[in-house]
Image: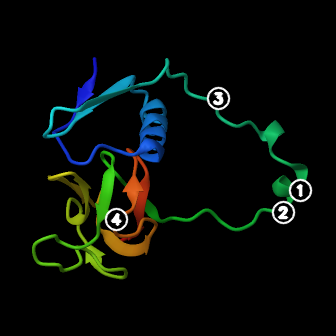
Amino acid sequence: MPLSVPNFEPLPNSEEVVQISQWLKDAGLSSLELSNAHGTRLRISVGDYEPSAAPTSALVSPSAQTHPEKAPSTDIPVKAPYFGNVLLCNPVTKKEFAPEGSSVRAEDTVAMLQIGELTVPITAPQNGTVAQFIAKEGDLVGYGQTVLTLQPA
């Protein structure tokens, strides 16, 4: 069943269509239909999704196994719940939602996604401190892409 989103202007350019297609495939979705106020419609369909196999230790070089780089990060990724352009500042007040180093609580809005006139909040999954922004203001990100990281409280 196709996923429909509200009308937005302008329709994506060719590079954005390629990126959206990849995000659809990565998310296991088969199609997306977009339209604008002029009635132009764009339907993006991708083939069957088959998740890739998890990497095995045989694929890791011997030097990587014997000399680990560093301990894994404990930072929590905050991921995009949809695709769109990142807004790190409130579009009305122009104030940052959650500046780097600020404390946030679970479910606080830390950024937003803009899809034409529609805005979708990106919320903190748990209490913590904003550690690092991965995406910048205006970046086009896909579903599940990390926007920022939190240090757990």
Which residue is nearer to you in this view: 32 or 152?
A: 32
Q: Report whether 100 appears left or right of 36.
A: right
Q: Amino acid at mark 1?
A: Ser
Q: Quadrant of the N terminus?
A: top left
Mark 1 and mark 2 in contact? Answer it, CB < 8 Å: yes
Secondary structure type for disc 3: loop
The residue to which callout 4 is attached is 138
Q: Which mark is in front, 2 or 4?
A: 4
**Image mark for residue 67:** 2
Residue 125 vertical placement versus 74 (above, below): above
Q: Amino acid at mark 2?
A: His
Residue for point 40% across, 53% down: 141
**Image mark for residue 53:** 3
Q: Report whether 8 appears left or right of 136.
A: left
Separation (CA) of disc 2 from disc 4:
38 Å
Mark 1 and mark 3 in contact? Answer it, CB < 8 Å: no
Residue most extreme to the left: 92
**Image mark for residue 112:** none
Residue for point 36% across, 80% down: 100
Q: Counting other residues with Cα less than 10 Å from the Cα at mark 3, is it few (<14), some (14-19), or many (20 or more)?
A: few
> Which x, y percent locates residue 7?
16, 40
> Which x, y percent locates residue 149?
42, 66
Which residue is nearer to you in this view: 126 or 115?
A: 115
Q: Which mark is in front, 3 or 4?
A: 4
The residue to which callout 1 is attached is 63
Q: Amino acid at mark 4?
A: Gly
Residue 120 in sight = yes
Residue most extreme to the right: 62
Of mark 3 and mark 4, the one earlier in the sequence is 3
Separation (CA) of disc 3 from disc 4:
33 Å
Of mark 3 and mark 2, the one earlier in the sequence is 3
Residue 51 vertical placement versus 91 (above, below): above
